[in-house]
Amino acid sequence: DDDDDDDDILTICLAINYGGRADILQATQKILQSILEGEVPPETLTDNNNTATEDYERLLSQNLWTSPLPDPDLIIRTGGEYRLSNFLLWNAAYAELFFSEVLWPDFDGEALGEALAWYGGRVRRFGGR
């Protein structure tokens, strides 16, 4: 196993006072400002080919507040709620979603173990079948 392997890294993100919609809006505003200032070519947004779409997705991701973080593989929602509630809306595109009845203050190692065991049984397809 290579010591530089990113598979060895676990990132845990608690989004306190974070809103996915607000994040997408502020990123879009930053990109539009960059276009107005001539830093980003306007065709990045309007060219209808896959390269432009990938370029814009990358540009949007780089301008999100969450840009330093990797996209999540697993999102755990506690408290018996079955919704994302404005959490990581852009980043969650290919995340596995685990819903737990356990309330956040009571979410302990056993509850985490249950979520990780469930995740370990998933087949990751990233949008494919």
Image (cartoon, rainbow, N blue to C red):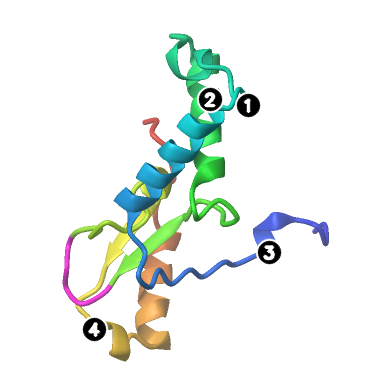
Mark nearer the N terminus (1 vs 3): 3
User: Disc 3 or 4, which lies upstream in sequence?
Assistant: 3
* SS for callout 1: loop
Residue at (83, 62) in percent of width and height: 3
Dot 4 alpha-carbon crowd within 10 angstroms: few under 14, some 14 to 19, many 20 or more: few
Q: Nearer the viewer, residue 111 or 35?
A: 35
Residue type highlighted by circle 4: Leu
User: What is the span of residues highlighted in magenta in the rendered image?
Assistant: 78-82
Instruction: Give the CA distance from mark 3 to mark 4.
Output: 29 Å
Determine if residue 91 is in view.
yes
Residue type at mark 3: give it: Asp
Asked if residue 49 lies in the magenta stretch, the reply is no
Residue position for label 4 = 103
Q: Nearer the viewer, residue 105 or 36?
A: 36
Residue at mark 3 = 8
| Residue 90 appears in the picture as rendered | no
